[in-house]
Image (spheres, rainbow, N blue to C red):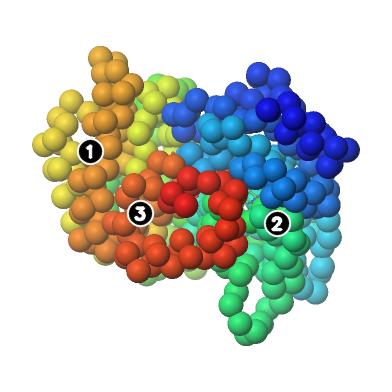
Amino acid sequence: MTDLRLASLRQAVPDLRLQTDAADLEHYGRDWTRRWTPAPLAIALPSTVQQVQAVMRWSAAENVAVVPSGGRTGLSGGAVAANGELVLSLERMNKALDYDPVDRTLVVQAGMPLEAVHNAALEHGLIYPVDFAARGSCSIGGNIATNAGGIRVIRYGNTREWIAGLKVVTADGELLELNKGLVKNSSGYDFRQLLIGSEGTLGVIVEATLKLTDPPPASNVMLLAIPSFEVLMQVFAAFRARLQLQAFEFFTDKALRHVLAHGAQAPFDEVHPYYVVTEFAAGDEAQEAAAMAAFEDCMGNGWVSDGVISASDAQAAQLWRLREGITEAVARYKPYKNDVSVRISAMPAFLAETQALIGEAYPHFEVVWFGHIGDGNLHINVLKPDDTGDAEFLQQCEHVTKLLAAVLARFGGSISAEHGIGLVKKDYLGSTRGAAEIALMKAVKRAFDPQARLNPGKVFDS
Ligand code: FAD
Ligand code: MLT
Ligand code: ZN
């Protein structure tokens, strides 16, 4: 059966690179979640848009499910292929195609790694500002499909803000050209925005027209030690009032301990409950003075216990490592990840309630908190205790997420701020989206993909 399908795929798309080695099936069938056993039919690695179209036409004819795949750094199981799907990897379509200095846009293929996009923008003296630690391995297509956020959302917004156009192959192999790089376009529904964040369930993104912008003036990175979460928001307000913030990220002492155990250098002699890494424009004396004034005010009010400011790019990188290294540092504890958001002003109340709730239900859990606090986005990582089996741990974490979802519903928050729903959070979609909204989402899915062949079972069951 399998061989017949692959034979027909080879016939339908003769030049397509197809891989079926056990190691490849394993490698391409999973993402960073590592929770599901990979079991794809095969891996297709097209090199042209026409090949992607031909693969989707074949998928329609043979009724085979397809999982669009980027760098598989996703944290929600969106790119997992565990049910005999064809993995459609965009990794060979990884080039910049065009740059327009008047529009200040860069056209790229979907498989281009985010870091390569950054470098291509810099070649034109501009930046593509969405950025986060997986930059070397994630793809721009995956970023768009998850509407990735990252460390500079406070200044530049999410991926959604930076997409001027998309080329998308539909479930039936049609090519849609969405928005074509236009700044203004009020000609009806904006399918470009619908595709952004659709997690591979509505179409395969093959090309994107990215907006670029000017690089920031020289910036400084500061690490602050904070005595309590309540005052952390005061520090945020004080810094935001005086400075053009590019990042305002937080982590706890527990998170720091894991990063230090992973080889980073301790920033302070003493241990503090919370830390903030903030980055701000510091191109002139007035901005430098504003930064010092914000820092001194906060010290004077007892909102900040200590601080260090980068004096070189190397030091800035060292400070960033303390925040960006957390995901890698805790990976060996098979963390169960929650990626939630509430309004920024609601963060202290939300965190206090959630901390109490998890602490009461599962006092033995080590919970590592960190995230994009300036965006109201918390990453709540529950680490697996050594003496708890995988299945039991998962059951307990699902219970935690259920409790969390109820709190989120009350706060009007989101069960996924930036990682996507994928497989891991689909049971909790209703905590964030109303029943009528979910019914409409399913109707949209049916309109784009009536046979439910594109990433089936992700976001919701089709
Ligand atoms: P994949 O994991 O391959 O896929 C993700 C989803 O997109 C899947 O549903 C897949 O089917 C779909 N998809 C992929 N390519 C396409 C395409 N061409 N067309 C249609 N659908 C497609 N995320 C953040 O938002 N902010 C962060 O700060 C952040 N930090 C991270 C740090 C680390 C160390 C790691 C490991 C991950 C981090 N992530 C972060 C999560 C992840 O990197 C992002 O979700 C990223 O956007 C995924 O890109 P990818 O190419 O790896 O996508
Ligand atoms: C981060 O902000 O570091 C990422 O979203 C990764 C994670 O949540 O582990
Ligand atoms: Zn994040």
Label 3 sits on residue: 429
Q: How many marks?
A: 3
Label 1 sits on residue: 399
The answer to which of 160 and 123 lies nearer the viewer is: 160
The answer to which of 230 and 185 lies nearer the viewer is: 185
Quadrant assignment, res 59: top right
Cβ–Cβ below 8 Å for labels 3 and 2? no
Pick whichever of labels 2 and 1 is earlier in the sequence.
Answer: 2
Q: CA distance from mark 2 to mark 1?
A: 39 Å
Q: Is residue 112 above or below residue 263?
A: below
- Characterize the local packing of mark 3: few (<14), some (14-19) or many (20 or more) Cα atoms within 10 angstroms: some
In what quadrant of the picture does the N terminus appear? top right
Q: Is mark 3 within 8 Å of ligand 1?
A: no
Q: Which mark is residue 351?
A: none
Q: Residue at x 32, y 50 (%)?
A: 428
Q: CA distance from mark 3 to mark 1?
A: 15 Å
Dot in front, 2 or 1 = 2
Q: Which mark is residue 172?
A: 2
Report helix, strand or loop for mark 2.
loop
Pick whichever of labels 3 and 1 is earlier in the sequence.
Answer: 1
- Characterize the local packing of mark 1: few (<14), some (14-19) or many (20 or more) Cα atoms within 10 angstroms: some
**Could you say where residue 106 lies in the image, as x and y percent from the top left?**
76, 61
Q: Is residue 7 above or below residue 428?
A: above
In this rendering, position of residue 128 left or right of residue 444: right
The answer to which of 419 and 314 lies nearer the viewer is: 419
Q: Amino acid at mark 1?
A: His
| Residue lying farthest to the left in this orientation | 360
**Is residue 407 in sight in this rendering?**
yes
| Residue lying farthest to the bottom in this orientation | 186
